[in-house]
Image (cartoon, grey):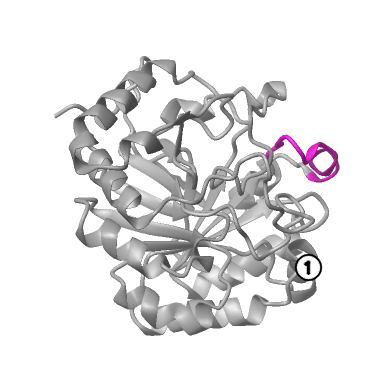
Amino acid sequence: MNILKDSFGRTFPYIRMSITDVCNFKCGYCLPNGYQIDKSDNRKFLHLDEIKRLSKCFSELGVNKIRITGGEPTVRKDFFEIINILKFESGIKKVAITTNGYHLDKKAKLIVDSGLNGINISIDSLNRETFKNITGHDRLPEILNGIKNLQDLGFENIKINAVLLNKINSSKKDFDEWSKFIQKNKIDFRYIELMQTGDNLEYFKKYHISSEIFKDYLRNNKWIYQTFGKDAGPSLNYINPEYQGKFGIIAPYSKDFCKTCNRLRITSRGDLRLCLFGNTGISVRHLLQRDDQLNELKDLILKQMQFKKESHYLELGETGSTKNLSKTGG
């Protein structure tokens, strides 16, 4: 079987598939003015048949995990149909989502019943007012209730992501609040360094801070760095025997961050993106229209692997064609 492998020897068993650009939150680091229709691209979002053919193709290229992203993926009315296709009709072993948690309290049972393998929820602060200021929505209590509902229903693979923002959620008090939260909850919490995109330069300059501040906190509080296999991805993970949950750090500005890259991206309109911050994306949508195009689709994707770069070069200020993270699923 042919597998996805680039010229640097990295393999790619993991796909992040965006199914919509639309998001109902207004996070300052991504869509501070809310979702705006891109008039330069009037293509519709991927249809169910296209998603089915694409996921089957990736399965035959050695992909074992697909994460559904957006925008906010749950705004699609056929969201649970998409999960069903990926879980039971494509050959993909693990299906996960990244969500802002909107209406999670009401959707928890549907998520568990769907057979989903994992969920990542964006919660940038446990302080209700801070959360509201970052996202534009006062919905922290319902999201936390949604997490509790998931746990009560026996759903275990829950992760929480927060973008690390200087002087907003980067104090010892913030770190202590998350420590207290995961001490009693079997949840992985990860800080992600704020990344510069095409339209957030001023915000980036004001709020970017190195994750070293959180690493120092972990070292000072007896957290132990946990190593994984080479296909585990770029997250740095920490454990403490006194805690049920784990801490993690995603530091894209750190040295050799891209060395363990194991994922490719599909945009909501059917473009293959080799890197979140790449300058190019090739459309594969014309090969998603019929079942008999499968081999041609696989050949196109395999040929693109030679163009994947060694690094995203974010540290040099290169953001590629990524205007904001809703465009490529973050």
**For mark 1, what is the residue?**
130
Q: Looking at the picture, tell me which residue is in the foreground, 324 or 233.
A: 324
State the residue at coordinates (36%, 14%): 7
State the residue at coordinates (80%, 49%): 166
Against 70, residue 266 (above or below) is: above
Kindly identify the amino acid type of the residue bearing the numbered disc 1.
Thr
* Residue furthest out toward the left: 1
Magenta-drawn stretch contains 205: yes
Magenta-colored span:
195-207
Quarter the N terminus occupies: top left
Residue 254 location in percent, x, y?
Answer: 60, 30
Magenta-drawn stretch contains 94: no
Residue 179 location in percent, x, y?
Answer: 59, 66
Residue 20 location in percent, x, y?
Answer: 52, 54
Q: Looking at the picture, tell me which residue is in the foreground, 134 or 228.
A: 134
Q: Looking at the picture, tell me which residue is in the foreground, 264 or 212.
A: 264
Residue 228 visible in image = no
Can you tell which quarter of the image residue 314 is in?
top right
Against 24, residue 308 (above or below) is: above
Can you tell which quarter of the image residue 315 is in?
top right
User: Judging from the image, what secondary structure is the residue with disc 1 in?
Assistant: helix
State the residue at coordinates (60%, 58%): 22
Determine crowd level at label 1: few under 14, some 14-19, many 20+ residues with C-alpha closer than 10 A: some
Q: Position of 213 compared to 230: left or right?
A: right
State the residue at coordinates (19%, 26%): 2
Residue 266 location in percent, x, y?
Answer: 44, 41
Residue 211 visible in image = yes
